Image (cartoon, rainbow, N blue to C red):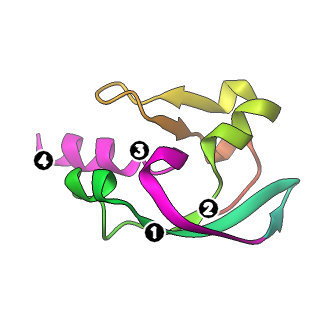
Amino acid sequence: LLLLVHKLMLHIKHDIKLKENIKKVGEQNGFNIYTWDWNDLAKSFGIENQPTRGVMAQEVMNVIPSAVKPHPVNGYLTVDYSKIGVTR
């Protein structure tokens, strides 16, 4: 159960609704790459120690909708990086 919870927490990190102080730091494979701080909502999920660099799910959804899915537990958007050619 603990492993399942950990996996679920890792997959919520791409939704812009969970981030603040967002800064564009570059591009990779046509996608903007950002750094950010977790907002209080994200921290309430216990993900404040997760990476704070990557893409925004809402932007990816406009280009490759099949790479973005809602999280099965909380509904926040997740990104399948293997479908977008971006490394984290």
Query: At label 4, which amino acid type do we have?
Result: Leu
Can you give x and y, in whole percent of width and height, for residue 59 in the image? 72, 42
Mark 4 lies on residue: 2
Residues marked 2 and 1 touching at CB (< 8 Å): yes
Task: Say few, some or many: other residues with alpha carbon within 10 Å of mark 3 (under 14 / 14 to 19 / 20 or more).
Answer: many
Q: Nearer the viewer, mark 4 or mark 1?
A: 1
Q: Nearer the viewer, mark 2 or mark 4?
A: 2
Q: Quadrant of the C terminus?
A: bottom right
Query: At label 1, which amino acid type do we have?
Result: Pro
Element class at badge 3: loop
Mark 1 lies on residue: 51
The answer to if 10 sits in the magenta stretch is: yes
Q: How far is disc 4 from disc 1 in space, using C-alphas?
A: 19 Å
Element class at badge 2: strand
Mark 3 lies on residue: 12
> Magenta span covers which residues?
1-25
| First along the sequence among labels 2 and 4 | 4
Residue drawn at (47%, 45%) of the image = 17
Residue drawn at (45%, 51%) of the image = 13
Residues marked 3 and 1 touching at CB (< 8 Å): no
Query: At label 2, which amino acid type do we have?
Result: Gly
